[in-house]
Amino acid sequence: MEVDEALGSLVAESGDRLLRVAYQLTHERAAAQDLVQEAILRVYGSIRRRHRSPDDLYAYLRRAVLNEFLRTRRLRSSTELVTDSMPDAAVVASDDAVLDRAVLWDRLAELSERQRAVLVLRHYEQLTDPEIAEVLGCRQSTVRSLAMRGIAALRSAAVLEEDRE
Amino acid sequence: MIEDDIAAAMVEHEQEAPTADDLLTGLRAQRHRHGWWYAAAAALLVIGVLSGAWAVTTDKPAAAPLSCPTKYAGKAPWVPTAPKGIPGNSRLVPNEMPRTAVVCSYDGMNSGKSPSHWGLAAKRRITENLGGLVDELAWQPRVVPGQQFSCLAVLGRQTNYLVGLTYSHGRTIWVSTTAGVSRCVTGTNGRFDTPPDSAVGDVSKALKSGRWPEPAPVGCDARWGRLGQDKTMVPAGSISLTICGTRAYPIKADYRELTTELNTLDTQAWLGVCAKHEPGTNYRLVFSYAVGPPAVVNLSSACQPPVYNGGTESDNSGNVIPIIRHLLGRH
C-alpha cells in the first residue's frame, strides 16, 4: 500500500499545483484537467507494475503531464499554427518594447508546444535550464534555443500589435 | 524585462485553472471508462483527494517545522536564510499549501542603539487555516524600486515577526514583517520585498491563536495593494467593485469598461509622492478577488498624479471619471 499512500498524498498536496501547470500549458480548463487525469492514471499504472514509487513523485508526475501535453499536441499538429520559426518580416523589438499582459497571455498560447513548455517550466515552475532539459529529455542548448525563439516570437507579436493600433 | 512580464502574466491567470475538486469530478467519470485497474486507481485517488489529510492518517512521520532563531540577528527587515528550493522572486510565498508554518516574534525599540539581535519573545506553530495564510501572503504586492512610504518619524516599540514555512521536498522560506509606530519597515522573504505592514495584523493574531485568521470583509478602508499592481492598475480576475466617495457604493453593473480604461492609461512606477495638495474630487476604487487582498486605485483631482494604486501611477485619468459617474448613476 506504500505506493497508493504516496500517490494519494501527493494528489491531496499537489493536485492544485499540477493543474495550474497544466493550465499554463493549455490555456484551457478542460484540457488541463484531462492532462493531469491522464498523467496521474498512467503514472499510477506504471509504478504499480514496478511496485515502487520514485523518490520525487511530484517531479515524476509533472514530467508525465509535460509528456502527455507534448504527445497530444503532436497528434493535433496538422491543425495548429506552429510558430517555431522567426517571422518573415525583419521585426526586432527592443527590450523596452511595452508588452500588454493580456496580449502576452494570448500570444503564449500561440507558441509551439515545446517553446511554451520551456517558458512555463522556466518562468512558472522556475526550473533551471538543466532541470528543464531533464524534464523534456533534450539538451540544454535545445532548451536555450526554444526559449530564445519563444521570447523572440512574443516580442515580434508585441511590435506587430503596436503597428496595428 | 519581458521575462518578468511573462512570469507576471502566468501568475495573473493561474486562478483560472481547475482545482482538485474538478479533478475529483473527472476521476469519478473515468472509473467506468477503462479496465479494472483504472477503476481501482481512480477510486484510490478519489479517496485521496477527498480525505485531504491522507498524510496524517498514515504512519508517515509528520514534517518538522522550522525552528525560530533565538535572536532576530539583523536590522529589520531580516530573514535567517534565503528561500531554499524556491526562487522566491515572483511572490512573497509560493501559491501552494505549506506543510508546516511557524510564527516567531521579537520585541525591541526602533531607536538607534540596538536595532538588531533582539531575543525571541514568543513562537507558535500555525496548524489551522493554512490555506488562508497562502491566500493572503501569496498575493502581497511588490515594492517598487525607489518607492517611498508615509512613515512616521517616531521612536517607539517595534515587533519583528518571522513566518517560517516548509514545503514538500525540503523546500523552505522565511518571511519577515514588522509592526511598529513608524510603519516604515518593509516585509521580505530575502528576494521579494513587500510594503510595510504587509499582513502584520494577521501574523500577530496567528501567533496568539495558532490559527491564521479569516480575511476581514473588504471595505473602503482596505489597505492597498495586490500582487501585480506594480505593473497593472487593476490585475486580472477581480470579482467585485466598490466605489468609495462620500460613502461606499457596491457596483452591481458590468464594470469591465472601467478596468479596461484604467489598464490602458499610460503609467509609470508610483514613488509614493503626491506633488500637490488641493481640495478636489476623490474616488477610491476597491476591486476584490476570490482570494488575496483587494486591488485599490485612488483617483484624486487634488493630487498629481491623479491616478495611483500604490505600485503604478498615471498623469492622466483619461475617461475614467466619466465612466465612474456613469456607474454611480446606475447605482
Image (tube, coloured by chain):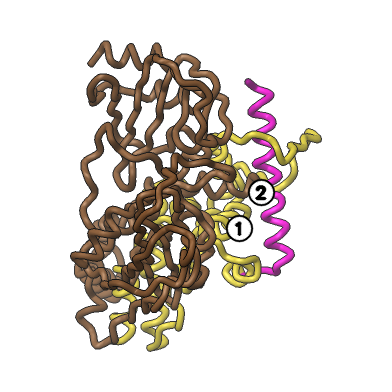
Chain colours: A yellow, B brown
Quarter of the image where one finds residue B282: top left
Q: Name the residue under label 2.
A: A150
Disc 2 residue crowd, few under 14, some 14–19, many 20+, Cα 10 Å: many
- Given the image, on which type of amino acid does mark 2 rest? Gly
Quarter of the image where one finds residue B278: top left
Q: Is residue B109 left or right of residue B246?
A: right
Front residue (pair B262, A10): B262
Dot 2: chain letter: A
The vertical placement of B291 against A159, above or below, is: below
What is the distance, in whole Å, between disc 1 and disc 2 at their CAs?
A: 9 Å
Range of residues picked out in magenta: A137-165
Disc 1 residue crowd, few under 14, some 14–19, many 20+, Cα 10 Å: many
Front residue (pair A129, A116): A129
Q: Name the residue under label 1.
A: A118
Position of residue B166 measured from the top left corner of the image (x, y, whole percent): 38, 72
The residue located at (57%, 65%) in the rendering is A127
